[in-house]
Amino acid sequence: MKPSIPKGTRDFGPQEMARRNYIFDTIRSVFKTYGFSPIETPSMELLSTLMGKYGEEGDKLLFKVLNSGDYLRGVDKQLVEDDNYVKLTSQISEKGLRYDLTVPFARFVVQHRNELQMPFKRYQIQPVWRADRPQKGRYREFYQCDADVVGSDSLLNEVELLQMIDEVFRRLGVRITIKLNNRKVLAGIAELIGAPELLTDITVAIDKIDKIGLEAVNEELRSRGLSQEAIDRLNPILALNGTIDERLKALRAIMADTPTGLKGVEELAEVVDATRQLGLDAELDLDVSLARGLNYYTGTIIEVKARDVEIGSISGGGRYDNLTGVFGLPGLSGVGISFGADRIYDVLNALDLYPKDTQVTTQVMMVNFGREESLGAMKTMKELRKAGVSCEIYPEAAKMKKQMGRADALGIPYVAMIGSEELAKGVVKLKNMATGEQHELTINQAIEVVKENS
């Protein structure tokens, strides 16, 4: 049987990995520039840590891990006969693959709170798993690159995160739109239309407007128990247009009698004003329908779209005031963003935005002329590597055409030749594969030429 991999997962060869590492290195560099420190958490978390943090739909998308050994021992067989898989799962599985990096981070903060200096700024670049239906831009295994600040209520953190998003995509050459909203605005809307108890249902539904359209959203709202009168009051709010300032002004008027909603509008205005003063390459937008569907957001909500490729959000995040509370540490506010590296990878592929030298790992390939010459070549390679020049030697003394063919196929920019004559003179013959020019140089001269042109 031909081997295969699960749907929604991918293999990455050397070229793909070079491109992905370019993305990771770019994001990591920006994180470090803004003062964030790295952490890692396990791939598996206890289901008690994960369940109930992502809403009903998120819980369904958690990959559960069967208990090791005889996982059916001691299980109530009646649950199997009754098809009661919710209770059955809790008995045969105590662990799950992490769904995102934020909830494990909240667990980490509570577990290690006595070791951390607040506010704590961390970044994390690791894979996550979701039992989702695979489609373009949506995978079951994918990397997230997160940066979060906990222990600070200041909206300066939101402004800094927006600057980071802008800087990452500026470096990658991707034109983006950053959409903003505030969970308090959504709570205010739910109050206004007389359905505060249905806030979660409303946010889950309206978050799908871009995908399924307003009419389908209205139908879902009806199925979730929202009255037609409430839907009629909601639709004009979702349809607000004009400039950001005009929409903020309209929202202030709409939220006049809801303190929660009005606070959300003021927070939005403060973030927008500070961001404008600092300047952005990105396009900034205010989207009242933006909810991001996750229950733990309590303030600012951020979503990033690529302007030149049709794909889902490529970054997003928001403010969460209560997430650590479920782990026994209430009153600790946090805000964070997450870059979807796999979608960014697809965007950069579609727009061909990778630097030409991204996939070049070897700068110099040494030709193998035989045992004695290859040892001389390897001594030269020690000097090259000490100077920071990556190099390799063809392992066999094959025909020159075959050796050169490998260097050409791998895009290696320089080939170095050390035959018996070069060994005697203590020099190296360096060939530029792009121009075809070759020169006899000392090792130090060869190092200088390669480094100057890298």
Image (cartoon, rainbow, N blue to C red):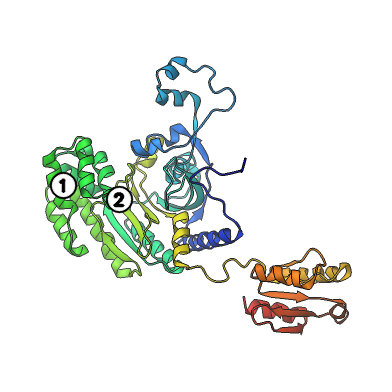
Number of numbered discs on residues: 2
The amino acid beneath tag 2 is: Lys
Where the N terminus falls, by quadrant? top right
Distance from Cα at disc 2 to Cα at disc 1: 18 Å
Is the residue marked by circle 1 packed among few (<14), some (14-19), or many (20+) residues within 10 Å? some
Q: In screen coordinates, is 137 left or right of 419?
A: left
Quadrant of residue 158 in the image? bottom left
What residue is rendered at 88% in x and 77% in y?
A: 420
Residue 289 in the image: x percent, y percent?
A: 24, 51
What residue is rendered at 39% in x and 36% in y?
A: 59
Q: In screen coordinates, is 49 left or right of 232?
A: right
Q: Secondary structure at mark 1?
A: helix
What residue is rendered at 78% in x and 81% in y?
A: 442
Q: In screen coordinates, is 381 left or right of 352?
A: right
Q: In screen coordinates, is 198 left or right of 363?
A: left
The answer to whether residue 328 of the structure is visible from this angle is no
Quadrant of residue 83 in the image? top left
The amino acid beneath tag 1 is: Leu
What residue is rendered at 38% in x and 36% in y?
A: 326
Q: Secondary structure at mark 2?
A: helix
Residue 329 in the image: x percent, y percent?
A: 39, 38
Q: Nearer the viewer, residue 436 or 177?
A: 436
Tag 1 or tag 2, which sits nearer the N-term? 2
User: Residue placed farthest to the front in the image?
Assistant: 1
Residue 438 in the image: x percent, y percent?
A: 72, 83
The numbered disc on residue 173 is none
Q: Which residue is mark 1?
A: 234
Q: Nearer the viewer, residue 367 or 406?
A: 406
Q: Which residue is mark 2?
A: 211
Quadrant of residue 48 in the image? top left
Look at the picture and state if 4 lies above or below 284: above
